[in-house]
Image: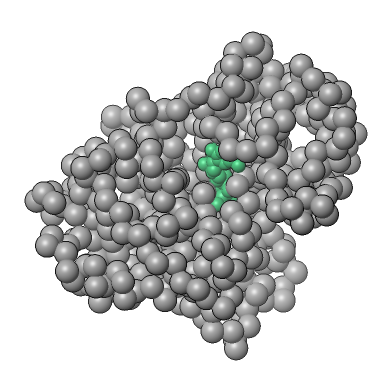
Amino acid sequence: MSNKPHILVFPYPAQGHILALLDLTHQLALRSFTITIIITPKNLPTLNPLLSAHPTSIHTLILPFPSHPNVPPGVENVRELGNSGNVHIISALSKLREPIVRWFESHPSPPVAIISDFFLGWTLQLSHRLGIPRIAFHSTSAFLTAVLDVVWENLEAVRGRRVVEFSGIPGAPSFKEEHLPSIFRRYRESDPDWEIVRESQLANSKSWGCVLNTFHALEGPYLDYTTKTKSEHRRVFVVGPLSLLGLENGVNLNRSHSVLNWLDECPDGSVVYICFGSQKLLSREQMEALAIGLERSDTRFIWVVKVGTNQQTEEGYGVVPDGFEDRVSGRGVVIKGWVPQAAILSHGAVGGFLSHCGWNSVSEALVAGVMILGWPMEADQFVNAKLLVEDKGAAVRVCEGADSIPDPDELGRVIRKSMSMDSPEKRRAMELRDEALKSVSEGGSSFKELDEFVETLSK
Ligand code: BUP
């Protein structure tokens, strides 16, 4: 390897976490860092476009993913395990320090820093062992970071409360307990895996620094709060929206998907795009309600359907109702499989996004100036939805809850109404798009902080 600074990058194996950190990695590679990405065999294909774009400066350290009593064999990605698998995956990965230490000690030019996902707080100890600083990468909002910090420090005060108030956070928000990430409801002192997760999260605030995938114009007050309260955590770099800086926005963007050709034929702003992220599988009843709602909306749509295992399909999960596709033929497209979401959202024909409000989806919608029709279900999604709907006025809420079944008539009506007329939410979404673009352009806040980050890493 060359003499350029060498950085270790360790993503968490969930699509929403990996992709954003790879966007940052792309930027570091463009700025002449040498990078090694720690990855498990099954997640290696996700890296392929980046490895092809930077064949000499990005390398991989492939971990032997362990057999662990709580991890079903071969499962290495939350996409298959679902959100409830996070505790097991974090715990299983944390048992893989030794191969990383051995690799590091035998490397002729070992890394000078590690950037690891905020779910992998245990890598703080690893960084101490390696004698290099750790930077926590947060693929979530600053609002969530603020909420989580308060919760992790005050678990007892939160547990069992129906409504949790965050008086110290700007705007003094409150959340129903079930709208906080479910991991907090799994608290059992006797569970050793749980302790790993808790310690891991607390380690984030003790790390050398952190990088946040958001931007000041979107989350100024929460960023000020986070920067101020993280007393030990002086180096906060706010560099988003990273999707604007990723490989996808470069010359290698793979825009070849037939649905983009279909969009070319649709009028501007006429299509609602529906996708609930890489993890959520809808039940039979939810699929039916959504299908009827879409039929009644009289609106053009693209619906990305996540398909489950054979057994889940037999139970009706992810099953598109019989005859639906024929009935909406010409007006709607159902896609079972991966689509280039960022490219779809940036297509002029897309005017709305029925979304679970995962942070990357939110960020990609903002970048495209597309209004969100929010259906938060779990994890950080309620926090993100509150930010968008109540703080920013750039989204409308159409449903909430992982198991909720929307009223099809109401759903159809809201979709039709939101898509057919100009609205304050649509205008707000466009304003935020301009702010997002300004942030990453020369002189913008994220542009400057990325430069500072690069400079600090280079010292
Ligand atoms: Br599905 C799907 N194409 O077909 P979120 C998702 N994505 O590009 P999640 C595609 O995956 P976590 C598809 O653009 C976004 O970047 C999408 O991240 C991309 O949701 C990402 O929105 C999904 O944060 O995230 O999957 O729930 O893994 O963080 O739980």
Q: Position of residue 58 (x, y in %)?
A: 26, 47
Tell me which residue sits at (62%, 17%) in the image.
Answer: 263
Quadrant in the picture for residue 427: top right
Ligand 1: quadrant of the figure: top right
Tell me which residue sits at (59%, 54%) in the image.
Answer: 79
Above or below for 221 versus 182? above
345, 430: nearer the viewer: 345
* Rendered image coloring scheme: one colour
Q: Is 22 situated left or right of 257 in this image? A: left
- Quarter of the figure with the C terminus: bottom left
Residue reaching furthest bottom? Answer: 190
Above or below for 265 versus 440? above
Tell me which residue sits at (42%, 76%) in the image.
Answer: 95
Quadrant in the picture for residue 298: top right
Tell me which residue sits at (52%, 35%) in the image.
Answer: 364
Task: Say if residue 153 shows up in the picture.
Answer: no
Q: Is 36 situated left or right of 255 in this image? A: left
